Image (spheres, rainbow, N blue to C red):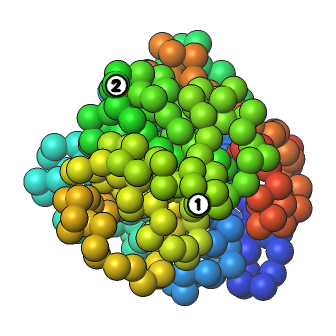
Amino acid sequence: MQTIGFAAHSASSNLAPFNFTRRAPRPNDVVMEILYCGVCHSDLHWAHNDWGWTTFPAVPGHEIVGRVIEVGAAVTKHQIGDHVAVGCMVDSCQHCDQCQKGEEQLCREGSTGTYGGTDRITKDMTYGGYSKHLVVREEFVLRMPDGLDISKAAPLLCAGITTWSPLRTWKVGPGSRVGVIGLGGLGHMAVKLAAGLGAHVTVVSRTADKAADAKALGAAGMLLSTDANAMTDAANAFDLIIDTVPIKHDLQPYLPLLDVDGTLVIVGQVGPMAELSTVPLLMGRRRIAGSPIGGIRETQEMLDFCVENNILPEVEMIRMDEINAAFARMEKSDVRYRFVVDMASLQA
């Protein structure tokens, strides 16, 4: 089907209108009109080829909420008119051990990214949610729970599940002590979700300018990483630290904050990190781990949890033609806390 989106044609170019063709729907496909798309820091990295493997033209966007407009003959879970969502992946092998246990993001053959991936059948490159329409395999289409504000929910499909998955993996609940490094798009969702699970949450930040925000989002307080005395006093204070910083940085100051058997989980930076000493790891049986997004089952669980607990991202709505200005603001951390594109603003 013919559609329109916004694409980057090189690492140095602005995103601009881009007419392209979505693949013909298969019997197990859902066709959706995209209503809202969140703006993730990964979108910016992809458009600028910061990771070195972008294929152009690039249509970013993997926090997608829309309405079903067509279903294939074999589709059973969704029908025309349903509000649905799609996150960071649109396919996987479906038969490996990871897929079979609902961990499609860890598919042994590699999951297919919503953008920049390779369609498993046509071998064409996938284009993301900065567009009017999407064609997706049914198994990767999520149900939007009744009562969840679809105009604000899009960032749950990446920022939400990226922080929810480690909270569930490390069994966070009442009594858990959780630190969150960074209070941006990912960090603010980590605070909301951890607090929603009953944890005692502390934001770890270089500056105190968001202390009031941290408390309003559900944190018990803020720890200044630039305050040496406060950092010393906070030794062994956390069972889990979620590190949302999206650039190369030093983990060394944060490791002593973990209690024995505590874990620091990296969910922000993709790529090199600063060199570190293993002494605090060895002496406290502490761990550094990484976590990507969650699987489809876990993502649906997170959406249902959010509607039950009235948890939504803090968003700023923009038009599609404001995306380049939004990218520039993101690079300066000038957003509180996630941009969402109203796709009604994208005209063919």
Query: Camera-side residue: 40 or 119?
Result: 40
Q: Which residue is mark 1?
A: 228
Which x, y percent locates residue 51?
A: 54, 81
**Comes first in the chain, label 1 or label 2:** 2
Q: In the rendered structure, which amino acid carries the disc numbered 2?
A: Gly
Determine which quarter of the picture holds residue 81: top right
Query: Camera-side residue: 42 or 275?
Result: 275
Which x, y percent locates residue 55?
A: 57, 81
Q: Is residue 249 visible?
A: yes
Determine which quarter of the picture holds residue 140: top left
Which x, y percent locates residue 59?
A: 65, 66
Judge left or right: residue 204 versus residue 72: right
Q: In the rendered structure, which amino acid carries the disc numbered 1?
A: Ala
The answer to whether 71 is drawn above or below residue 114 in the figure is above
The answer to whether 267 is drawn above or below residue 200 in the figure is below
CB within 8 Å, label 1 to label 2: no
Residue 175: give its label.
Answer: 2
Farthest residue, direction left: 97
Q: Is residue 1 visible?
A: no
Residue 23: give its label.
Answer: none
Instruction: Give the spatial CA distance, label 1 vs label 2.
Output: 26 Å
State the residue at coordinates (38%, 59%). Answer: 256
Determine which quarter of the picture holds residue 275: bottom left
Which x, y percent locates residue 83?
A: 57, 26
Q: Secondary structure at mark 1?
A: helix
The answer to whether 238 is drawn above or below residue 4 in the figure is above
Crowd class of label 1 (few under 14; some 14 to 19; many from 20; radius 10 Å): few
State the residue at coordinates (44%, 70%). Answer: 252
State the residue at coordinates (30%, 48%). Answer: 259
Judge left or right: residue 65 versus residue 314: left
